[in-house]
Image (cartoon, rainbow, N blue to C red):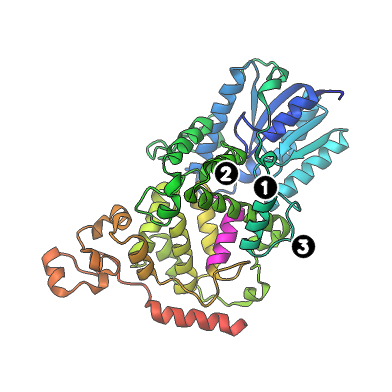
Amino acid sequence: MSLHDAALVWFRRDLRLTDHAALAAALRAARRVHCAFVFDTDILDPLPTRADRRVEFIWESVRLLKQALQGRGAELLVLHGPARRLIPELAVRLEVDAVYANRDYEPFATARDAEVAGSLAAAGRRLSLHKDQVIFDTDELLTGNGRPFHVFTPYRRAWQARLTPGDYAPHAVAEHLDRLAPAAPTPMPALEDLGFTRTNLAALGVQAGEAGAQARLQDFLQRIDHYHERRDYPGLKGPSYLSVHLRFGTVSIRELVGLAVARDSEGAWMWLSELIWREFYQMLLWHYPQTVTHAFQAKYDAIAWPNPPGHYEAWCEARTGYPIVDAAMRQLNQTGYMHNRLRMIAASFLVKDLQVDWRLGERHFADKLIDYDQAANVGGWQWSAGVGTDAQPWFRIFNPVTQSQRFDPEGRFIRRYLPELAALPDKYLHAPWTLPAAEQTRLGFVPGRDYPPPIVDHAKARQATLALFKAVR
């Protein structure tokens, strides 16, 4: 195979040097390979706060990637501006034949990449996109009728039936690293130069980059066999906590799938199922980009959500009077993370107890979550709201008290994030308004004074929500 003279690898959601599809392809195809990352102002400028944990995590991961490349005598060119303009300009300046990048499935990214591809083609160059962040993408996994799957369980079965070791084999990068273009070190814009400030990321113990991902992974491998038993309990150390690393590609999905398959335990297979859920939502967003703002079940777009004044604000500020919901929202506000079971509970409560449009909740999570993934977030919110594909049925509505009693029975999680309730006995912790007068006197705790009263009556709210759905069915 004849080699191109030069290529450019455009790093995006893949901030690592190992098992990297686009980098491996470029190293095979070109004699000299340049590397670049763009802090894309089309993405950064609309963010609602300048103290954004995601931007800090990305910045730290880019810094570490830059150091790793410099250690090999190469360089990561770090730019700041609109990527749709800067990448074609850089390709011309470096005189590369092609730009290599890993495929993204979000509507913004696909539109941006189409524009970049057009600009490159006009200059006699090309954009070469590669599958990297999923095992199966676009149309690789379809029903027998050649259509996208709409239900998860058949998709999972098809996914697992098709999987072979070759699907999760790593992309070889090390053998051709000598083709990285030699370069002198160049400066990288400081976080403040990008218009952002430090957050509490370091205090939370969130370690960026490949090293951070591997530390999380090694910790999880000590617990993976019990994942199926612990994953739903926010007071326990159950999840992998790898979601932010998957989101920004500081770890390879192929490595994680390979480890899960090799482990072959009930916990590992349950975790693999969660990784497949991630791909299910990526596939759906690719095929149905309109679901970012429209219900997958289009008839539910006709629901006239009441959005009662003050309900959304109380939910955002953890003032609903339901401890499991408020503790979940405090976790989100304080850390940028929320346990997956709590994401379902909090989403269900906003939509089906407070009658607030699911799109407002989805947008709030988009602004707050450090691991925000549009496909998973939109899919999860539509599932909880009962308006999506393979959704929680519209008539099933989480009871926030029984969910709390079931998944945080001893109140470990609630007491951590709602210390004002720490002294309450377990019996009353999940519904503080039921605390008897004698206990109020003994504890010096008065519901409504020391903690908000319930913002709604769940039973009445449930009936109101059922009426909303029935009106459009």
Residue appearing at x 67%, y 45% in the figure? 135
The residue under label 2 is 261
* Quarter containing the C terminus: bottom right
What x and y, as percent, mark residue 72? Answer: 62, 17
Q: Amino acid at mark 3?
A: Gly
Q: Which residue is mark 1?
A: 163
- The disc label shown at residue 235, or none: none
The picture places residue 309, in percent across and down from the top left corner, at 45, 72
Q: Residues within 10 Å of mark 1 (few under 14, many from 20)?
A: few
Does residue 362 lie above or below 94 as drawn?
below
Q: Main secondary structure of the magenta part?
A: helix
Q: Residues within 10 Å of mark 2 (few under 14, many from 20)?
A: some
What element does badge 1 sit on? loop
Label 1 and label 3: CA atoms lie apart by: 17 Å
Asked whether the beta carbons under mark 1 and mark 2 sit within 8 Å of each other, the answer is: yes
Q: Is residue 376 magenta?
A: yes
> Which label's residue is closer to the chain start, 1 or 2?
1
Q: Amino acid at mark 2?
A: Val
Q: Which residues fall within the magenta stretch?
A: 372-384
Identify the mark nearer the N-term, 3 or 2.
3
| Residue 203 shown left or right of residue 91 in the figure | left
The label shown at residue 144 is 3
